[in-house]
Amino acid sequence: MDWSKDLSHEQETLKKMTDAIIHRGPDAEGHWFSKRAALGHRRLIVIDPEGGLQPMLYKDGNDTIGLTFNGEIYNYQELRKELEEKGHEFQTKSDTEVLLHAYLEWQEDCVQHLNGIFAFGIWDERFGKLMLGRDHLGVKPLFFAQRGSAILFGSELKVLLSHPLVDAEVDKEGLSEIFCLGPTRTPGHAIFKDIHEVRAGHYMTFTSNGSTTTQYWKLESKKHVDDIDTTVETIHSILQDTVKRQLIADKPVVSMLSGGLDSSGLTGLAGNEFGNKGERLHTYSLNFINDEKDFEQDFLRFDRDEPWVKRVAEYVGTKHHSIELGSDSLIEYLLTPMRARDLPGVGELETSLYLLFKEMKKDATVALSGESADEVFSGYPWFHQEKFLDAEIFPWSVNLWYSTEILSEDFKAKISPEKYQKQKFEDAVAEVP
């Protein structure tokens, strides 16, 4: 978006930006240009292959409202019905069109009606306004940068770095984030100088008069008062509803299975849904060559996955695929996840996941995962062990001493790792409701 420059002839620049994330959306591309706005999109098809093309446009007289959107709206069928009752007419079966009409009906408050994972940008010519919105927990990434009168945004940092106005410059604070907090980041911080991230549970609006940031959702800390039976029933009900919603797709859906509680529970629920339709769920796991002989316990892994994977797959009745990896593959693709993130990651952990996803993609587009269950249900050791509980920094940072060992004493003095870690921890605790 640019309030002082005509963007209607910026095809080359926008194409370069969307080409930077072909890997993210390999199925289709789209571009739309007007005097003040240029929207681009790379699509990974999940729902309504023909009708969900983007950017999606709506004409209101001489004005256009344009949407570019990454994610899924899990309650789009209920929302569509509600909007139809309010007089909205739909031309497709896509959740993209439902999101666009939700904005037309409720403006920025549309995010209050969404159940899903999403990052989107909406340009509204009627008001000369750009809205950027991100889902409640920040599952979908959304970065932006302001350069003079221009607002640039995209799903990955490389989108912005592909624009001639944006330099790949990392300042002192960015280096502090990498070496003191990595692989996590301070919410809203994008490492590169003068590039930012729309925070989870927030939306932003931009006009020629400036910008506003609004937090539309946050977790609340409450005392748990339910007994064990009520708790189990509540969790089961929520998970069952979640799995049902996330199985809605026009492309094949599979499930990751590690044999742990989280992926096993989701696999069981999804397996039942498939069985009710007379179908068989496909599951996938990783197994390292010679793992049976070479496996060693650490503070995160207490046992091998494979024996438990086999038991769960047999019990649920899935068609299971065990993907074997060796050290050669891990070395060959070690840097691939880092290039995808545009930032340092978690070493071979992300590499092994990338190779698993690569195999899964041969058969499916959507995969269920137990990601974040350890955060929700206190599965990590730092929720229980005193050395982590007593630390006045993020517990996962306790074992990150090695990340600063490669630095010179002069450089460490400049970024002050201990001070930075403590300050960011205190800032985060201060936000807890």
Image (cartoon, grey):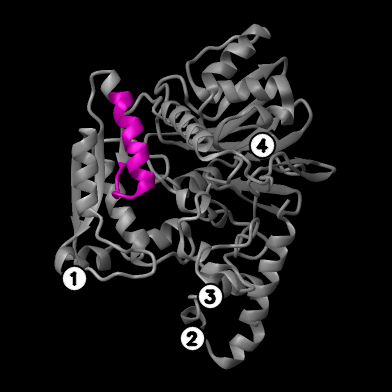
Query: Earlier along the polypeptide chain: callout 4 or callout 3?
Result: 4
Q: Residues within 10 Å of mark 4 (few under 14, many from 20)?
A: many
Q: Nearer the viewer, mark 3 or mark 1?
A: 3
Query: Which residue is tagged 1?
Result: 294
Badge 3 amino acid: Lys
- Tell me residue 66's x, y (percent): 63, 28
**Which residue range is magenta in the image?**
256-274
Residue 50 drawn in magenta:
no
Gap in angstroms between the C-alphas marked 3 and 1: 28 Å
Query: Which residue is tagged 4?
Result: 37
Instruction: Determine the secondary structure under disc 4.
Output: loop
Instruction: Determine the secondary structure under disc 3.
Output: helix
- Image label count: 4
Q: Nearer the viewer, mark 4 or mark 3?
A: 3
Q: Nearer the viewer, residue 10 or 94?
A: 94
Q: Does residue 293 appear left or right of residue 110 in this picture?
A: left
Query: Earlier along the polypeptide chain: callout 3 or callout 1?
Result: 1
Q: Quadrant of the N terminus?
A: top right
- Name the disc covering residue 387, or none: 3
Badge 4 amino acid: Ala
Badge 2 amino acid: Glu
Residue 258 drawn in magenta:
yes
Identify the residue at horizontal 39%, vertical 23% (top origin): 49
